[in-house]
Amino acid sequence: MKNLVGVSLLLAMLNPLPTLASGQDCANEGDPAALENIRLQRQAFNQAIAGKDLPGIEKILHQNVLLVTGTNSDIYSGAGAQLAIWRDDFTDPDRAVYVRTPLCIRVSVVVPVALEYGSWRGERPTREGEFAAGSYAAKWRKVDNVWQLESEIFATEACGGGFCPASEP
């Protein structure tokens, strides 16, 4: 039940996503040091994905992190569940490499949280034209003076090759 409540709150929080992700009415807001720390954490997360660095990913994830995938809306709750996804992914020689590119980060002045909106893309380096891409939103929480990724939700908006769903007859 807790996960359903969390997903409902996350979806409500994302209501302004289409406007903000397109860059309209979205300016980075909040403490400049917090904004820079979150940008650095995102960069480290992207590098850890590319480098198959499971401990690097683990350092960035909040223990209760929630992930909602872009194509099938699969839900993964907790750092252990997300680390299992990456662990399996890293063993695939034909794996896709995913990059999240922030377009806007807003840091709360009320509590130690921030929202990040951006675009994402996953590509298989071994297969030209194989990709999935779209928009995402992420929530960060400052814990013990470190910004940790607390949730991410993705929407798949473009694809190529094997990433595209099969057509229905």
Image (tube, helix red, strand yellow):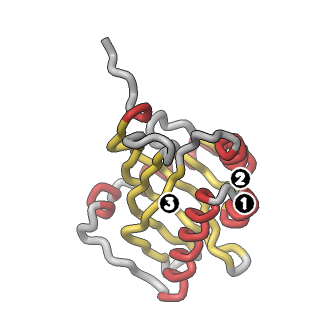
What label sits on residue 138 in the rendered view?
3
Residues tagged 3 and 1 counted as in contact (Cβ below 8 A): no
Q: Element under label 1?
A: helix
On screen, residue 114 versus residue 168, left or right, reads right
User: Residue under circle 2?
Assistant: 79
User: Residue under circle 1?
Assistant: 58
Of marks 1 and 2, which one's residue comes earlier in the chain? 1
Residue in front for this viewpoint, 113 or 26: 26
The x and y percentages for residue 56 are 70, 64
What is the quadrant of the N terminus in the image?
top right
Looking at the rendered structure, the kind of residue marked 1 is Glu
In the rendered image, the vertical position of residue 143 relative to residue 90, given as above or below:
below
Looking at the rendered structure, the kind of residue marked 2 is Ala
The x and y percentages for residue 91 are 70, 42
In the rendered image, the vertical position of residue 100 relative to residue 112, given as above or below:
above
Q: Nearer the viewer, mark 3 or mark 1?
A: 1
Between the C-alphas of marks 3 and 2, the distance is 15 Å
The x and y percentages for residue 71 are 44, 37
Q: Residue shown at 37%/68% (left/top)?
A: 103
Q: Element under label 2?
A: helix
On screen, residue 111 versus residue 156, left or right, reads right
Looking at the rendered structure, the kind of residue marked 3 is Ala
Q: Residues within 10 Å of mark 2 (few under 14, many from 20)?
A: many
